[in-house]
Image (cartoon, rainbow, N blue to C red):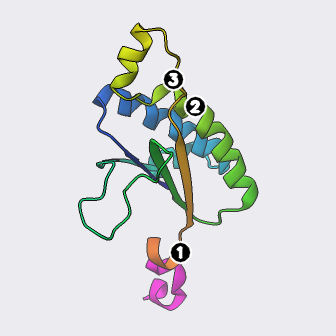
């Protein structure tokens, strides 16, 4: 089943719940999942600093982006990626927290661009998620 990871600065739990619920709905539609498969979708929030703490490693969130949404699922086709990406980017932009300096900018009447979200897709091998699916002999044992 799909695994979604959001790499971002920390945010309130209420905001995480709303984002997770909406991402689950989008995942169901984009990947054509049955309603009973809803509970097998995992959404994980990973708060990471902007800069790398270790020399020689890139920052957790690539330059120009405020967040990264990693999608790991079985049989990711280009159509599924496009459908998920278009809907997720539209939904996430107003829900994700803006930077602290944006409050000051709003008070001064300066309009900031919405948060930038990078999408990363990885195909999940059946052997990794369920070893019994990949090895029929083992299933029989």
**Residue under the point 45% across and 33% down:** 19
Q: Quadrant of residue 96?
A: top left
- Coordinates of residue 67 in the picture (x, y in percent): 45, 44
Report how many numbered discs are placed on residues in the image: 3
**Residue under the point 54% across and 49% down:** 118
Where the C terminus falls, by quadrant? bottom left
- Residue mark closest to the camera, 2 vs 1: 2
- Coordinates of residue 9 in the picture (x, y in percent): 32, 40
First in residue order: circle 2 vs circle 1 = 2
First in residue order: circle 3 vs circle 1 = 3
Report helix, strand or loop for mark 2. helix
**Residue under the point 58% across and 45% down:** 27
Label pair 2/1, CB-CB below 8 angstroms = no
The residue range painted magenta reads 131-141
- The residue at which mark 2 appears reads as 91
User: Looking at the image, which is closer to me, 125 or 86?
Assistant: 86
- Coordinates of residue 11 in the picture (x, y in percent): 31, 33
- Label 3: how many residues lie within 10 Å, few (<14), some (14-19) or many (20+)? few
First in residue order: circle 3 vs circle 2 = 2
């Amino acid at each position: 089943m799909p695994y979604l990871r959001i790499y971002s600065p920390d945010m309130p739990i209420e905001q995480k719940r709303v984002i997770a619920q909406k991402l689950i709905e989008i995942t169901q539609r984009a990947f054509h999942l049955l309603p009973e498969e809803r509970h097998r979708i995992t959404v994980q929030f990973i708060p990471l600093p902007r800069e790398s703490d270790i020399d020689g490693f890139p920052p957790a969130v690539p330059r120009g982006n405020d967040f990264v949404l990693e999608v790991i699922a079985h049989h990711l086709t280009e159509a599924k990626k496009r459908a998920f990406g278009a809907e997720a980017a539209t939904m996430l932009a107003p829900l994700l927290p803006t930077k602290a300096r944006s409050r000051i900018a709003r008070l001064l009447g300066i309009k900031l661009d919405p948060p930038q979200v990078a999408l990363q897709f990885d195909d999940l091998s059946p052997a990794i998620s369920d070893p019994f699916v990949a090895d029929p002999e083992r299933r029989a044992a």
